[in-house]
Amino acid sequence: MKQLKQAQAILLPEKYGMTLLQTAGLLGVSLSRVTQLRRMPLKDGEERAPVRGGRKRQNMTPEEEAIFLAPYIQRSADCLPTALNIKRRLDAYLGRAVPLSSVYNLLKRHGLIRNARE
């Protein structure tokens, strides 16, 4: 039934020039549901949920981050370089500039600094 509604949500406006609001009324669903149905791709006849969350704009995978930070993790706490020095090395490693906040988030993810609230 979902697949039929999805097909109707796509075809009715395209083939018959109906508005999305008219399509929603005909299908008996809300306007937002019609737009959701139109955006959901089909895979082998089954509906796929949109992927949400995750690190969409990540600079490196968690494994690459661990390799990059390995020299800093092995050092003692009293001789850790500043975040600005790590930022310069990260900029050179990636071949582009990254915000200093990304460096702090990287260090926090790997336990090299703690959140002030903790």
Image (cartoon, rainbow, N blue to C red):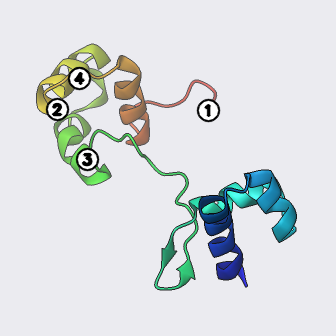
Question: Where does label 3 land, which residue?
Answer: 66
- The image position of residue 1, as x and y in percent, is 73, 85
Residue kind at label 2, given as amino acid type: Leu
Task: Provide the residue designation for mark 1.
Answer: 118
Q: Amino acid at mark 1?
A: Glu
Q: Residue at x 31, y 19 (%)?
A: 83
The residue mark sitting in front, 4 or 1, is 4
Labelled disc at residue 86: 4
- Label 4 and label 1: CA atoms lie apart by 23 Å
| Relative side of 43 to 77, left or right | right
Q: Secondary structure at mark 2?
A: helix
Residue at 72% x, 60% y: name it: 34
**Horizontal and vertical percent position of residue 73:** 25, 39
Give the mark nearer the N terminus: 2 vs 4.
Answer: 4
Label whose residue precedes the other's in the sequence (3 or 4): 3
Check if mark 2's residue and mark 4's residue have beta carbons within 8 Å.
Answer: no
Residue displayed at 58% across by 24% down? 116
Q: Which residue is mark 2?
A: 94
Q: Which mark lies nearer to you, 1 or 2?
A: 2
Closer to the N terminus: mark 2 or mark 3? 3
